[in-house]
Image (spheres, helix red, strand yellow):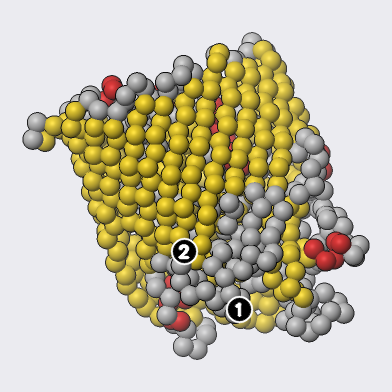
Amino acid sequence: MTGASNVLPAVTVTAPRALENEPTNAASEQRISGETLNSFPVSRPGEILEAVPGLIVTQHSGEGKANQYFLRGFNLDHGTDIALWLDEMPINMRTHAHGQGYADLNFMIPELVESLIARKGPYWAQEGDFSSAAAIHLHYAEQLERNVVLATGGSYGYWRGLAAGTMAAGRGALTGAAEIERYDGPWTIPDALRKYNGVLRYNEGTPSNGLSLTAMAYTNSWHATDQIPQRAVFDGTISRFDGIDPTDGGDSQRYSLSGHWSRTEDGVADKVAAYFVYSTLNLYNNFTFFLNDPVNGDQFQQSDKRRVMGIDASRTLQHSLAGFGAETLFGLQTRYDIIDLGLFNTYLRTPIGTIRTDHVEETSAGLYFQERLRWNDWAQTTLGIRGDTYWASDASSLAGASSQTTAFLAQPKFGTVFGPFDKTEFYINAGIGFHSNDARGISSGAPLLVQSRGAEVGARTQAIKGLDTTLTFFVLEFDSELVFQGDTADTEPSRPSRRVGVEFTNRYQPTSWATINADFAYTVARFTGSGINSDGVVGDIVPEAPSVVASAMVTLGEDTGWFGSMRWRYFGARPLIEDGSVWSGSTSLFDARVGYTFKSGLKLTLDALNVFNTQADQVSYYYASRLSGEPAEGVNDVHFHPTEPLAVRFTVTKAF
């Protein structure tokens, strides 16, 4: 782009790296290095995403299950409106047994991640399904600079081993990694997590001129201590770390093959990515205990087996248009899912009745076009258009539930950047996006595609040396909200909604060995349709929508010698029912790290999770359940999954 040198460096949370010279197109856009993502302690792999300002990543039921995500006033459940990608493979699963958009990141190996790009809002032509709140692209390193072996041991039966390295192979390089993890947790009935994970990649050339082929394999099994009723803890029937059903849990597998080819010459950049994913999930949950079946209990199995294949191809041209610097981007994204789903009543994980089975085939094709014009050294405009067509068919065992449907949605996009003026830029963005609904709901009248509308204005400044600050105001509307139903462990379409909020982020690096981060987000989430929910509750408050999210972190250290970090994460109180009469508590946690890196490549790391042993909840819901001896209609109550107590983990790493 003409005048690109005048664009501010992109946001990098650590010291300036190779990412710093890439321009941002919205105030909320983030580019984060793998070094930053691995600079703070995490309980589980998906938590590295909390480096994205305003994003909360938590867990409510067993360590092998997909995380639960919260961002911009959304309870995103397991991925309803946050699109996650790893090396251009979609992680979100549509028409999933446990919830629309289910995005399981437990197969990700954090140490392999080289970079992360986060794009919030529906303003990006290349982003489609599930991306209205945000799209996050993770990228593994093509090659590792050094081979590495590490071993971790810690509280509550935590053990992890990882070996990864790169070697020359033919005209390119072969990179491999293998991971084993065990974890019991503080629960009365141990999680008994057993995870095995592997990656093998061959690559030639560079990311802009080269190719790579990648195979991944992952398998996991676990027990789950699900959310528990608050009343049973208060009256002493159970402790915070007990469960009601001793056999909840599950197992999952994921195998994938993917390839990426790119070529850049004479102002033209071509990229083609293709993938095939085979995954399975068997999940056993009991959230209502004895409400529906007083004899056998309410445990049920959700079974998901699928094959996913797709292609993502794009071309970017740098050129001049009417005398102005221009960049044209256009592309095609296709995806085909073949899905076998089952929902069964179970007792101690043994099926005792079939609720329904479905064979679903879902195909999508998205075409997009985007034109960016730089009018002068201080103004540029981006215009885009995207069109998505979906075809879905469901062969169901339920009478009258089989269906076929097609849907199309056009989505215009707009963005403009003014500046820099005294190292300050101003941004305006707007667009239309969407999420798809579960294809099994089409027979009951739910639309296959649901439109969203969003806009934001913001500013970013580096006027103070070493300080990068952004301030963003946003609004996001949906024609239909996807709401988590605690008693069925699924998401259901609900009323239209609107969110209005602000995000304030700061990155300060006073020296080469110290970085300070501080982020704050505030959102108001309301339904805009009829004021009565499906259970007859009056109110327009969106349940489980967080109003306040904040975090702060101090990171110290350089390539060798002492290093450390301290991170604070605040997850504000959430309304649990539409009339605002029941709220969760807030959660405020501190994690810390200290270690030493020797010049020989040996590194010793000590992590402390929940440093002050805070007693709080990871997630909370409000619904009816029934314990032994309670009324047949059950008792409405808060159901919660507690934060884990203070835990320490010690890691020995050797790079060579």
Task: Please indicate whether residue 627 sits to the left or right of residue 135 in the image.
Answer: right
**Label 1 SS:** loop
**Tag 2: Cα neighbours inside 10 Å, few (<14), some, or many (≥20)?**
many
Residue 531 in view here = yes
Looking at the image, do the residues carrying marks 2 and 1 touch, with CB atoms under 8 Å apart?
Answer: no
Closer-to-camera residue (61/540):
540
Q: Residue furthest left?
A: 322
Residue name at image x 50 percent, y 71 percent: 494
Task: Please indicate whether residue 335 sits to the left or right of residue 226 in the image.
Answer: left
Closer-to-camera residue (173/624):
624
Residue at the disc numbered 1 = 535
**Tag 1: Cα neighbours inside 10 Å, few (<14), some, or many (≥20)?**
few
Taking 34 as reference, is 450 above or below it?
below
Q: Quadrant of the N terminus?
A: top left
Q: Amino acid at mark 1?
A: Asp
Residue at the disc numbered 2 = 497
Residue name at image x 62 percent, y 23 percent: 555
**Label 2 SS:** strand
Image quarter of residue 20: top left
Dot 2 or dot 1: first in sequence order is 2
Taking 531 as reference, is 58 above or below it?
above
Image quarter of residue 412: bottom left
Disc marking residue 622: none
Residue name at image x 28 percent, y 22 percent: 5
Q: Amino acid at mark 2?
A: Ser
Taking 469 as reference, is 328 above or below it?
below
